[in-house]
Image (cartoon, helix red, strand yellow):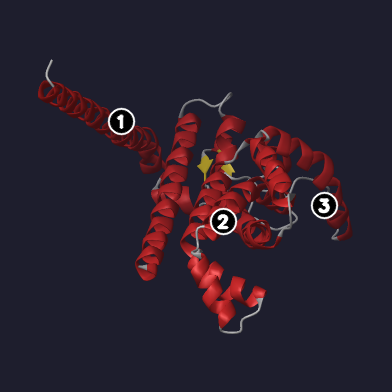
């Protein structure tokens, strides 16, 4: 084989490989799209009829969940899910960003590596273990607050917020640290050259420059907080009442596994309806966070 033929053969092999890989990537992308469409259609087909039977306003705004009497109001669950997620983010986001700042900019020597290993370990702990630790360690402390407030000792919204904030903390720390490390060093050098202190440079230059990455970490944290069921089931008390900080609550995610085993008929359909509401809820959150990220990226550009 001549050198020219060898070059032509090599080029054809590369083109063939590129064509095969392009087709594989296309199939993977189509599979992802088809999966999302299939899940969407299935959720609407399964949960839509019961919402139509009960009435969308009664289902979404009803305050009583009593399947035995045909009452299927899920407003307490919706509000509990919103408050638990918002409370967890309010605690975990600033804490996670500050830890990320410490790891990426302030921690000396080999300390960042040791702390990252612990954070990775924290991220790998199963949710049931978080729930168990919450029930053993956090619950007794909250029981004291409930006793002081004249309330019965039980699971509570505060316990759910505490456990969720700890669970999403590793995700926020890891993504935020990556975003902070990606900020060009020239930004910080310019701020220091203009007379900024180290902390002023971090909080006025580095963190604003990394806000899109930090927002991405928050989005991932919100996704995990909204979708968590097992740990919350073990600490929330699981009472379908309007949420108060020291009273038991039930989130959308916990209602389905709690009642699925003994549900039937309209009750089973209502659980599908809860799944549909949760699905729409997560889609709205993801769309809103995606819009925020795109807006942040446009401003940075």
User: In the displayed structure, would residue 82 be above or below residue 66?
Assistant: below
Going by the picture, which residue comes out furthest to the front?
Answer: 2
Identify the image quadrant of the C terminus: bottom left
Distance, label 2 to label 1, CA atoms, is 29 Å
Callouts 2 and 1 close, C-beta under 8 Å = no
Q: Relative to residue 277, is residue 154 drawn left or right?
A: right
Front in this rendered view, residue 263 or 124: 124
Looking at the rendering, which quadrant does residue 88 occupy? bottom right
N-terminal label among 2 and 1: 1
Task: Decide if residue 79 is in sight here.
Answer: no
**What kind of element bears circle 2?**
helix
Residue 136's x, y, as percent? Answer: 83, 39
Residue 132's x, y, as percent? Answer: 76, 35
Q: Nearer the viewer, mark 3 or mark 2?
A: 2
Residue at the disc numbered 1: 28
Residue plotted at (49% across, 29% down): 268
User: In the displayed structure, would residue 64 be above or below residue 98?
Assistant: above
Rendered image: mark on residue 176:
2
Looking at the rendering, which quadrant does residue 69 occupy? top right
Distance, label 3 to label 1, CA atoms, is 47 Å
N-terminal label among 3 and 2: 3
């Amino acid at each position: 084989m001549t050198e020219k033929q060898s070059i032509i053969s090599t080029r054809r092999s590369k083109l063939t490989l590129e064509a095969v890989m392009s087709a594989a990537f296309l199939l993977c992308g189509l599979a992802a799209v088809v999966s999302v469409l299939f899940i969407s259609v299935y959720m609407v087909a399964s949960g839509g009829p019961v919402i139509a039977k009960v009435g969308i306003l009664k289902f979404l705004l009803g305050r009583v969940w009593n399947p035995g009497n045909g009452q299927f109001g899920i407003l307490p669950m919706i509000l509990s899910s919103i408050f638990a997620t918002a409370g967890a983010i309010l605690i975990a986001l600033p804490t996670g960003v500050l830890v990320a700042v410490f790891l990426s900019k302030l921690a000396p020597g080999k300390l960042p590596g040791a702390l990252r290993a612990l954070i990775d370990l924290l991220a790998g702990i199963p949710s049931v273990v978080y729930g168990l630790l919450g029930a053993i360690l956090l619950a007794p402390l909250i029981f004291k607050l409930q006793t002081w407030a004249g309330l019965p000792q039980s699971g509570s919204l505060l316990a759910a917020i505490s456990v969720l904030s700890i669970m999403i903390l590793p995700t926020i720390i890891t993504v935020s640290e990556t975003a902070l490390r990606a900020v060009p060093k020239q930004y910080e050098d310019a701020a220091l050259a203009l007379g900024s202190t180290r902390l002023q440079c971090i909080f006025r230059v580095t963190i604003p420059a990394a806000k899109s990455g930090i927002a991405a970490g928050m989005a991932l944290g919100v996704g995990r907080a909204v979708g968590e069921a097992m740990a919350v089931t073990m600490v929330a008390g699981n009472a379908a009442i309007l949420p108060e900080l020291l009273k038991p609550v039930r989130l959308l995610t916990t209602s389905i596994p709690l009642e699925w085993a003994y549900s039937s008929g309209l009750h089973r359909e209502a659980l599908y309806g809860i799944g549909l509401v949760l699905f729409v809820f997560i889609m709205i959150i993801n769309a809103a966070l995606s819009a925020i990220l795109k807006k942040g990226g446009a401003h940075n550009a």
